Image (cartoon, coloured by chain):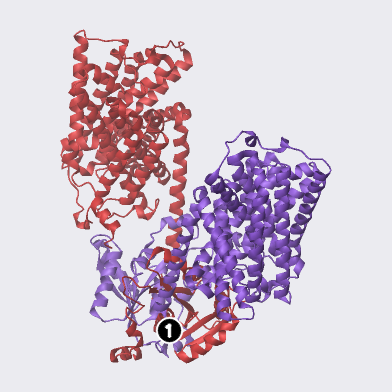
Chain colours: A red, B purple
Amino acid sequence: MSTAATRLKRLLFGRPLPSDRLEHERLNKKTALAVLSSDAISSVAYATDQILFVLGGAMGLAAVAYVVPISAVIVGLLVLVGLSYRQTIFAYPGGGGSYTVAKENLGVGAGLVAAAALLTDYILTVAVSISSGVAAITSAYPTLAPHAVALCLASILVLGVVNLRGVRESGAAFSVPTYVFVVAMLLLIGTGVWRMGSGHELADTLTMKRASVGQPPLAGFAFAYLLMRGFAEGCAAMTGTEAISNGVMAFKAPAQRNAAVTLSWMVSILAAFFLGVSFLAQHYRVMPTADQTVLSILGHHVFGGGPLYFLLQYSTFAVLVLAANTAFADFPRLGSILAHDRYLPRQLAARGDRLAFSNGIIMLAVVAALLVWIFRGNTNALVPLYALGVFVCFTLSQAGMVQHWRRSHEPGWRWRMVLNGGGAAATAVVAVIQIVTKFAEGGWIVVVLIPLLIWMLVAIHRHYVRFAKEIAYTGQAPLMFLHHTVLVPVGEITKASAGALVYATAISEDVRAVYIEVDPAHTATMRARWDAWDVGVDLVVLPSPYRSVLRPLVGYVNDLQRAGETDLITIVVPEVVPHRWWEHLLHNKTALYIRTAFLFRPSVVVTNVPFLLGRAGRLRDLFGHDAQLERAPTEREVEVALT
Amino acid sequence: MSTAATRLKRLLFGRPLPSDRLEHERLNKKTALAVLSSDAISSVAYATDQILFVLGGAMGLAAVAYVVPISAVIVGLLVLVGLSYRQTIFAYPGGGGSYTVAKENLGVGAGLVAAAALLTDYILTVAVSISSGVAAITSAYPTLAPHAVALCLASILVLGVVNLRGVRESGAAFSVPTYVFVVAMLLLIGTGVWRMGSGHELADTLTMKRASVGQPPLAGFAFAYLLMRGFAEGCAAMTGTEAISNGVMAFKAPAQRNAAVTLSWMVSILAAFFLGVSFLAQHYRVMPTADQTVLSILGHHVFGGGPLYFLLQYSTFAVLVLAANTAFADFPRLGSILAHDRYLPRQLAARGDRLAFSNGIIMLAVVAALLVWIFRGNTNALVPLYALGVFVCFTLSQAGMVQHWRRSHEPGWRWRMVLNGGGAAATAVVAVIQIVTKFAEGGWIVVVLIPLLIWMLVAIHRHYVRFAKEIAYTGQAPLMFLHHTVLVPVGEITKASAGALVYATAISEDVRAVYIEVDPAHTATMRARWDAWDVGVDLVVLPSPYRSVLRPLVGYVNDLQRAGETDLITIVVPEVVPHRWWEHLLHNKTALYIRTAFLFRPSVVVTNVPFLLGRAGRLRDLFGHDAQLERAPTEREVEVALT
């Protein structure tokens, strides 16, 4: 196992870890806030941009007048959803993921819809967060802009490797970027508001060129529709709200209480930041451009391009990478739950060498990288695919909670049900708005993808159920008495065929050497040699007028089985294993062909007895050493053979 | 075997043919001339072009003055080589290929040089003949010119398929194109000469544009070198001269006599046509262009573009395809001889379903197609690679004949030796001229390729010799008494593991079920179930703290072997064989991993017992039917098991 590949694997991913090192680190509130909120809080890096991007495209700079009202509506929705999830925390202390809640309360169908929506969502969390994080960097260093896609792919690669190593030091190390970002945002909003009051207001100098072009005024339905689109895009701010209620079990005791408090903090911070950025954008009349995010334009203006500006950009990048990292924890975990429930391949269920769910991590990294590559790392193009899945999950999760309260009849179940019902209704409406307004912008991809994913989950489940049924064995101890015939195809008398014959005689009394007669002229010689060898095994000659090795063998096996003289046939094929790769081309793949020909035939087993061609001068046959084939049996061997 | 692929194969290549249909059709002189001369005679389609192409590039239309003298020198050489090969016919009635003659008389080294030169040559025969044949078609239909490469590839594909079917109807059917071409050429030369005498001479109207541009006069060494280059390129006319002496065994009795007469005819026809075309080209001041071959320009002028012109072009194409077809017979035949002598992979030695050497045909078609594709079907670019190999073969073959006469001392051996020696010397000089003058034009490719090929032949030979030595078995009947331990990895009690256990107990007394303990919590349950099952096989539990299935198993096998308690270990692995391709993704490839892990370990055999998932509703396990696993043994089975 100590090959170059193994050594490289060790270097990148570290030594394997034993299973007993799998323990759960319990987080205090401050650390939990940092770790579990990065996804939600980091949304402020792109949510305001999306509203302005959509509205600005149609109405130019006039758009800034609508960004605060729209943000306020979203914050209202956020508070409602936050309260709703607060209830989930108390109802599901073991972590109430949308899949679990929907499946338990609404049935398997709803659970699968939630699962499919979540899977797409985690992938998009990585793609959007990384694209947006790289945009923060390229906003600060415009010369890097042409390399944005490469930077995105490199970031995903690094995240993948780090997660394959298994992230043991999660808590403390991970809280730094979030808190630095929080501080930078507080400074930005504080300074922005302060400078505003001090008469430092600037105006249109910060606007994008497109915005100065006069746009025809909009009215009536078109205007309302546009506002709805802006609202739908801005809802990207709400992604990640469910993280804390999913992770209750990670909190220190009293876990539920602590989680609920942390959730309140998170919602407050997110609401404040989102409103703050939107307010500043309106006041300073900021429009995002292709090269500059709203945060970058604001930071540049408010901080004047000094070290604080770069701190803002770096910490934005860091918190977005952290947000992507939460998907690297959640996707494989959901994958393993789904695999455990037999909806995904069982390879996703097992932990790898480093106790991480390696296959899930690799799958997520590959799909997210593909997505970033297809959309050229463009956040604006990726976001329309994003929030839809999130809102489907919100809706199902809260609808599940409604059912939960109705069944449980716990104290206060009525008003709790109403609260969750309100959340479910509101997010359902938003989900519909998402589908309608974003459909043409790329939302259709998700609308097509989620049913496809569900279909896949169901197909996989059907297979495993059928498989379990087919393979289930309820009988008693299996039958032990069989007539077992062993066939050994031989071309010449060589060490390889001698090895195969030794093996054959070790596993059965009824051994027959089979010679495929391609050239009848050679048969007599072969038979003479065989008789002279006197190995105590009959040589069966099968004519092959069409020069095929397989057809006569298949025919002979057919005849044996039809005659009913045997219960089980083993074909023992000597297989030459060359030392160098190109030497494989110099040998017929007869062993492989024979295996394939009999793969689907009951009561026939094909066994390859490898014959190893010299490696580093050592000649080995089946028994490791020549001499052994020629020596007389020892007493013990005779004893064993006769008992 | 009756799958869609098999049916397509049948449709394209026909039903398999039995070996006894392999008989040799004997040819009379007329048919033999047509079949064996197409390669040589068809050279007139491009030889004159090559001389003019080279000279015209340097001296413009003045080149036509030198084409007849150069052609005359080549014809002189042709006659000398023809006489030389006439002697080979009588010395090697079994067919005297360059490889055979060189190897027998000059040793293995010379034989391998000839073999490598011949292999490159056959490939180039296909590439050059097909490119030139397609040029005859595109000369007649200029609109097809952009599709020249596609036409070439299609022609090679058709040739490949026809040859894979096995060409039974060779003789008669194949003589038609050659004779039509001969008639068309006779008409062309006759009419051309007649119209010349009747005052119909035209002049510069037929010249290419490039030719009318004044060229600086050449003198001294540069001039001589240019003539040499023209001569070297024109030598492409001589390719194929050896075909008749290689094919003596195909002639009706008296084979040698008939072959010699046919050779004389062939040389005469080729000489007459080559000189005729060169003479007409000089007289009518013809220069080939990128779109028009010399034959096409002449034909158009002499026949006035009527049906005779198209007959000439079609028959040129046909005879060139026939020339390529001879390579499709010769290359696989040489390949099979080399494979038989262990210089090429043994897969090339065997005849396929239709008695053709299928692998050689496929290899030739693929390499020639690649070559045509790389050189965009440009005959002028391909020819510089061509004749070099031919002249190396001529030289080696005739030098071999010198040695042959010196050894044999047959009547007249002295003058025969002188004749062959003269031929060898002349062709050796030409070979040197070829290398020098064509090196920069692409000849270097062949100069590099031939040594590479020789190195490959030698490496393959070394492998087979070492292989034969390693595998040779001279001992007596192999040892029959071994302690054989069988391990069956089990995860749960299923039909698959039951099948594997049935097989295991059928092949040994010492069977141990091995349970890899990934999750210690589950071990007690498993052990309880196992004991309840009461199958009479011990369950060995191997802890796996790192969750690997392989490592504990490898460790256990190491321990067993180190303890010396066993001679032979078989690991019987149940292998689930799903019905649909995607279902493979849903099952761990444990069986494959175990096989790979133990592939290079002596005294360990890995056997997969397939468990087939339901196909078309039929549930099969190892023994074809459920019930069999649960019924009591029959009397016969008990009897067999106890004896």
- The image shows residue A122, relative to residue A286, as above or below, that is below
Q: Is residue A515 left or right of residue B62?
A: left
- Image coordinates of residue B497 in percent, x first then y, are 39, 70
Q: In terms of secondary structure, where does tag 1 sit?
A: loop
- Image coordinates of residue B495 in percent, x first then y, are 42, 69
Quarter of the figure that contains the C terminus of chain A: bottom left
User: Which of the two residues, A470 or B264, is positioned nearer the viewer here?
Assistant: B264
- Label 1 marks a residue whose chain is A
- Image coordinates of residue A130 in percent, x first then y, are 31, 35
Name the residue furthest front.
B220
- The image shows residue B24, relative to residue A291, as above or below, that is below
Residue at left 41%, top 28%? A429
Name the residue furthest right.
B198
Answer whether residue B621 is visible to the viewer in this image. Answer: no
- Image coordinates of residue A417 in percent, x first then y, are 32, 34
Q: Which residue in the structure is indicated by mark 1?
A: A508
User: Which of the two residues, A352 or B145, is positioned nearer the viewer here?
Assistant: B145
Quarter of the figure that contains the N terminus of chain A: bottom left
- The image shows residue B565, relative to residue A213, as above or below, that is below
User: Which of the two residues, A393 or A315, is positioned nearer the viewer here?
Assistant: A315
